[in-house]
Amino acid sequence: MKKINARQVGHAYEREIRLELIKLGWDKCQTTRFANRELDYNNVDFVNTSPFHIQAKRWSHAPAYQDVLKSIPKDNNYNIVIHKKPNKGEIVVMGKETFYQLVEMLRYNGII
């Protein structure tokens, strides 16, 4: 039986999310492991996904979301974490301030 390598599983999940982001319109999206080592080191997993900095996690337990969000650079991008828990589904986590800013943007543009 083949041993599961958590690092390989995590990298495969990043590649999966990258393809989903491309389908959503970020056609120049790349993983930071491939395109930008500095951002990769700063816990951002994808480039060319403005206005978002995205960290993808595929862990069987919940990461300390607040710590992950704090580790991502603070700039003009919204910081989010996409977490997949095997056999439980996927969620997107963001700070309350980020959520409120997105709601205000939707309201301003007449979407809600």
Image: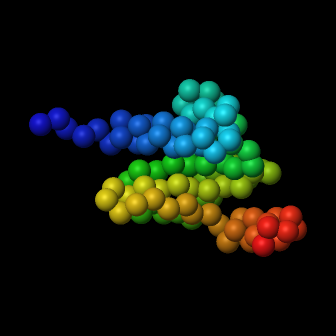
Left-right relation of 73 to 33: right
> What is the residue that sits farthest to the left in this orientation?
1
Q: Residue at x 61, y 38 (%)?
A: 22
Q: Confirm whether residue 101 shows in the render.
A: no
Left-right relation of 7 to 66: left
Image quadrant in which the N terminus is located: top left
For the residue pair 80 and 73, the one nearer the viewer reads as 80
Q: Residue at x 63, y 45 (%)?
A: 24
Image quadrant in which the C terminus is located: bottom right
Q: Residue at x 56, y 26 (%)?
A: 34
Left-right relation of 107 to 47: right
For the residue pair 89 and 46, the one nearer the viewer reads as 89
Where is residue 20 drawn, in percent x and y? 55, 43
Where is residue 106 drawn, in percent x and y? 79, 66
For the residue pair 60 and 70, the one nearer the viewer reads as 60
Q: Is residue 73 above or below residue 99?
A: above
Q: Is residue 6 above or below residue 72?
A: above
